[in-house]
Image (cartoon, rainbow, N blue to C red):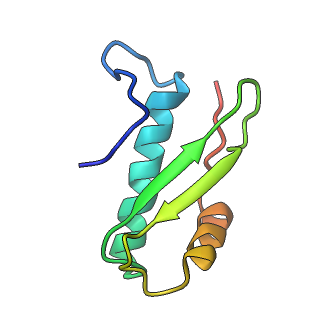
């Protein structure tokens, strides 16, 4: 179960940032867990209208991280392209 911003996904095409970002965040979280960097993971991504780069990326591991949370955030920024494109 993952939290999302409250908007419905049904009927939205992938160009809508809330839908595409939710899928991307799940992909990132899944890979952090699969890599053994945390046992649980949730990614929060924020965007601004007209800006492709996320304005914020937060990694929540619920205390299960194997490396510092700050390092996880840096790894996400380095290895995952979370830019929104239309």
Name which residue lies at 50% across and 39% down.
21
Q: Is residue 77 left or right of residue 34?
A: right
**Residue 62 rendering spot, x and y as whole percentages:** 37, 70
1 is higher (above) or lower (below) than 70: above
Q: Is residue 22 above or below residue 85?
A: below
Image quarter in which the C terminus is found = top right
Q: Residue furthest top?
A: 11
Residue farthest toward the bottom in the current orientation of the protein: 66
Residue drawn at x 41%, y 41% as measured from the top left: 23
Q: Position of residue 64 (x, y in %)?
A: 36, 79
Task: Please give the name of the residue rendered at 44% of the width and 18% of the height, measured from the top-left corner.
Answer: 13
As drawn, 73 above or below 28: below
Judge by depth and name the residue closer to the eye, 80 or 61: 61
Q: Residue furthest front?
A: 63
Describe residue 6's horizontal placement relative to residue 83 as left or right. left
Q: Nearer the viewer, residue 65 or 36?
A: 65
Farthest-out residue, left: 1
Relative image position of residue 84 (x, y in whole percent): 64, 35
Q: Residue at x 40, y 16 (%)?
A: 12
């Amino acid at each position: 179960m993952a939290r999302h911003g409250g908007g419905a996904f049904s009927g939205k095409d992938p160009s809508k940032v809330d839908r595409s970002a939710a899928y991307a965040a799940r992909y990132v979280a899944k890979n952090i867990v699969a890599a053994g960097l945390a046992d649980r993971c949730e990614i929060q991504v924020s965007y601004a209208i007209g800006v492709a780069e996320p304005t914020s990326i937060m990694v929540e591991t619920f205390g299960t991280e194997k490396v510092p949370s700050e390092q996880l955030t840096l790894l996400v920024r380095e290895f995952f392209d979370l830019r929104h494109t239309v």
